[in-house]
Image (cartoon, grey):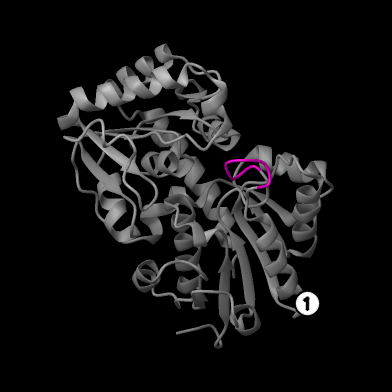
Amino acid sequence: MTVDGKKAVVIGPYRVHNFGDDLVGAIIAKHLRQKGYQVSVPLLDKENSEWLGTEYAENYDGTIESADTIVVGGGGIMSDTSGSKPGASYLDIVARRAIAGKLKNKKILVTSVGAGPWILERSKMLAFGISLIADKIGVRDEESFKHLDSIGVKGDKVVLGADCALLSSDYLDFSPRSNGKIGIQFDTKQFEAFRDNPNVRDITNAIKKYSSENSSDVMLVSNRHNKSPLAKDAPACETLVYERLQDFLPHLAGLKAMFTSHLHLAITAYSQRIPTFSLYAREKTKRFYNQIGHPERAIDLSTATLEDFQRFISAAENAVWTEDDEKTLQDLQGKARSLLDFLE
């Protein structure tokens, strides 16, 4: 059933087939479906679309024109630092689609996004433009709220919440497959921090060595379709490769702990009450660890040392979920719901 035949289209970075982007898009789409909308998520692959019950669209042709509501959502798409280098983001594509929708008098909503920082002046203007035409904007952290405020986006239009990936179990139907392993994901060669920090090579070698020597207790995780680059040096390790949400989520949710450089692997693990640790390449990951009250579990890759990895992996082996963690999770999940509540 639809609400008076209404349709919604979700615009985001779905052509990349990255786990975190697809997950947030899926949660937004499921929320809209629960509200009775017919939903399409252009560029989300066919298997995920079928599982979600959304219309498969391999491009944007006709989707903007046929929709009543356009939802911009998922990822750091209101910044120009969400890719591997400045300017490598989805912001330009999102802006074009949102403006096209506004010109056709569609409702424009933005939610569960990271906003700023901006390196390029053009990117700042695009973010401001999207904000100007949006009816409502939901940001996933306080820093994003402040970045929008700094460019003049103020008032009741902006809702401060938390990343909708925290609601993975609320909207998506899967059951954890307990394996008791430590998930390890470390693929940072495309980031400048990898080149700038001479310690990263030693860290990478230590991760390979640890994975190989503890293969029965380690699962090598990839947030994309390709296998973890660590697998070649630790061939005995079980691997988890992202292809479809319904296959990936149960295994991820069954981990004992998570060590990752990827934001949404950390967020999803945390949503499943799995302790998580990160040597991160982008500021948005630091923001998340500040939110969950564990800033000590996230270190900038550009300054990380071998000792930091050794400390993290030792902590991961012994980490437990605490009452304070549970209280924080419940609070953040409430804030995440506020970013979906205005999608009516």
Image point (49%, 57%), residue name: 16
Looking at the image, can residue 12 be seen? yes
Q: Nearer the viewer, residue 15 or 38?
A: 15
Magenta highlight: main SS: loop
Q: Residues within 10 Å of mark 1 (few under 14, many from 20)?
A: few
- Secondary structure at badge 1 equals helix
Q: Quadrant of residue 126?
A: bottom right
Q: Nearer the viewer, residue 126 or 163?
A: 126
151 over 338 or under it: above or below: above
Start-end of magenta stretch: 81-87
Q: Nearer the viewer, residue 171 or 288?
A: 288
Residue 231's x, y, as percent?
Answer: 27, 37
Looking at the image, can residue 342 be seen? no
Lateral position of residue 185 relative to residue 137, left or right: left
Image point (49%, 32%), residue name: 292
Image point (51%, 75%), residue name: 40
- Look at label 1 and name its amino acid: Leu
Q: Quadrant of residue 86?
A: top right
Residue 289 among magenta residues: no
Residue 309's x, y, as percent?
Answer: 39, 19
Image point (58%, 31%), residue name: 192
Q: Nearer the viewer, residue 195 or 141?
A: 195
Locate the N terminus and report the quarter of the image it occupies. Answer: bottom left
209 over 190 or under it: above or below: above
Residue 288's x, y, as percent?
Answer: 53, 36
Residue 156's x, y, as percent?
Answer: 76, 54
Q: Which residue is mark 1?
A: 103
Locate the C terminus and report the quarter of the image it occupies. Answer: bottom right
92 over 278 or under it: above or below: below
Lateral position of residue 154 relative to residue 53, left or right: right
- Specify the farthest residue to the top: 307
